[in-house]
Image (tube, grey):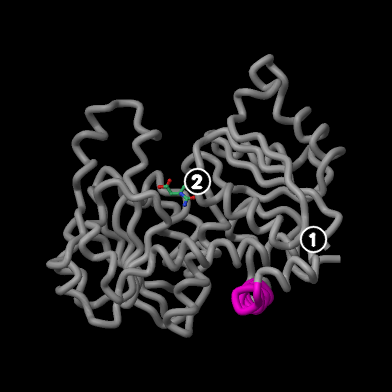
């Protein structure tokens, strides 16, 4: 039996403090052990992961697949979901039943909100949500939390700025679910007004006792922050290209922006970036996004290893 509190990981609200402690301890272990030794240990030997992707992905799919293979497990993959029998009209429900006979665990990404939760009802093996539309992306939030914890040594008592797409950015939604449960966190929500966090999510934050501030101006907010989470404007969620054109260049973080923050500020981005972070800051000590992508591998190794047992 897994020591984690969940069997499927669909929503970051399922993750409690004990889950995070278990995951982070194993993540540290994998991060500090030689890859070849980990393969020899074979924590997922004899298990098979199916990755089902109905939307583009680089880091999430590759890091899950690398993770499984580094643990001596195997993978089968559907990189372009529409190349499957879904195109012939097969339902996700039937697909869930079928893949459950072939694999031991499933990672799935799909554009529709709630689709992965529905799929999981019909699957008889654990399912991990790798993004369902603009709703949730819990494993990215685990990666973000691990990065913050590693860099700052705590997940509480932080002043956290989130800038970019708070309406459609699913990783932001999941990260807020995790961090709002730690005490004394304060959130500055920085977005174009049309991309603000929705009211029910704001209410959830205040219900957990978090202070929230909302603004469209990044520069004045910088001085106070310990952590800045940057997100891409999610172009694929806009039905009107003109609406996207209006907001796409709202934020561009460069050396001048960073100079307004504390020297110990850390800047995260789940990537891919388009224009929101200038490459001129990539080598500054504040920039942690490439490290964050690397940590994604170890966090997903820990998650697979704990969920599969
Ligand atoms: C994110 C996603 O797919 O939601 N990407 C990722 O998994 N690292 C963020 C994004 O696409 O902007």
Local crowd size for mark 1, using a 10 Å CA cut-off: few (<14), some (14–19), many (≥20):
many
From the viewer's perspective, tell me whether residue 88 is left or right of residue 13: right
The outermost residue toward the bottom is 153
Residue at (26, 43) in percent of width and height: 194
Identify the residue under disc 1: 44
Q: Position of residue 303 (x, y in %)?
A: 68, 63
Range of residues picked out in magenta: 20-34
Residue nearest the viewer, comparing 30 with 3: 30
The N terminus - image quarter: bottom right
Q: Position of residue 164 (x, y in %)?
A: 30, 52
**Alpha carbon distance from label 2 to label 1:** 22 Å
Query: In what element is the residue under mark 1?
Result: loop
Residue nearest the viewer, comparing 42 with 53: 42
Residue 86, compared with residue 245, is above or below; it is above
Task: Please identify the quarter of the rendering in which residue 190 is found.
Answer: bottom left
Residue at (67, 50) in percent of width and height: 128
Which numbered disc, 2 or 1, marks the residue that appears first in the sequence? 1
Residue at (54, 62) in percent of width and height: 296
């Amino acid at each position: 039996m897994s020591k984690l509190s969940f069997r499927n990981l669909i929503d970051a609200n399922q993750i409690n403090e004990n889950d995070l402690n278990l995951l982070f301890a194993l993540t540290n272990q994998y991060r500090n052990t030689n890859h070849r030794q980990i393969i020899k240990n074979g924590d997922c030997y004899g298990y098979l992961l199916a990755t089902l992707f109905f939307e583009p992905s680089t880091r999430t799919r590759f890091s899950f697949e690398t993770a499984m293979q580094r643990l001596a497990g195997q993978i089968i993959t559907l990189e372009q979901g529409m190349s499957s029998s879904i195109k012939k009209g097969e339902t996700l429900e039937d697909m869930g039943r079928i893949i459950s006979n072939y694999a031991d665990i499933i990672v799935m990404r799909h554009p529709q909100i709630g689709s992965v939760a529905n799929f999981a009802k019909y699957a008889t093996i654990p399912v991990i949500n790798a993004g369902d539309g603009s709703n949730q992306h819990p494993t990215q939030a685990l990666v973000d939390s691990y990065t913050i914890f590693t860099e700052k040594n705590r997940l509480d008592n932080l002043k956290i700025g989130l800038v970019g797409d708070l309406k459609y950015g699913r990783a932001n939604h999941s990260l807020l679910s995790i961090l709002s449960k730690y005490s004394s966190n304060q959130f500055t929500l920085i977005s174009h007004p049309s991309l603000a966090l929705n009211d029910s999510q704001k209410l959830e934050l205040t219900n957990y006792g978090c202070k929230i501030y909302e603004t469209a101006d990044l520069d004045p907010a910088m001085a106070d922050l310990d952590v800045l989470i940057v997100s891409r404007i999610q172009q694929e969620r806009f039905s009107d290209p003109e609406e996207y054109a209006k907001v796409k260049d709202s934020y561009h973080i460069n050396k001048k922006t960073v100079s307004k923050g504390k020297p110990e500020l850390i800047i995260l981005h789940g990537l891919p970036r388009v224009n929101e972070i200038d490459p001129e800051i990539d080598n500054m000590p504040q920039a942690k996004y490439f490290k964050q992508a690397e940590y994604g591998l170890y966090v997903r190794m820990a998650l697979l290893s704990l969920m599969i047992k």
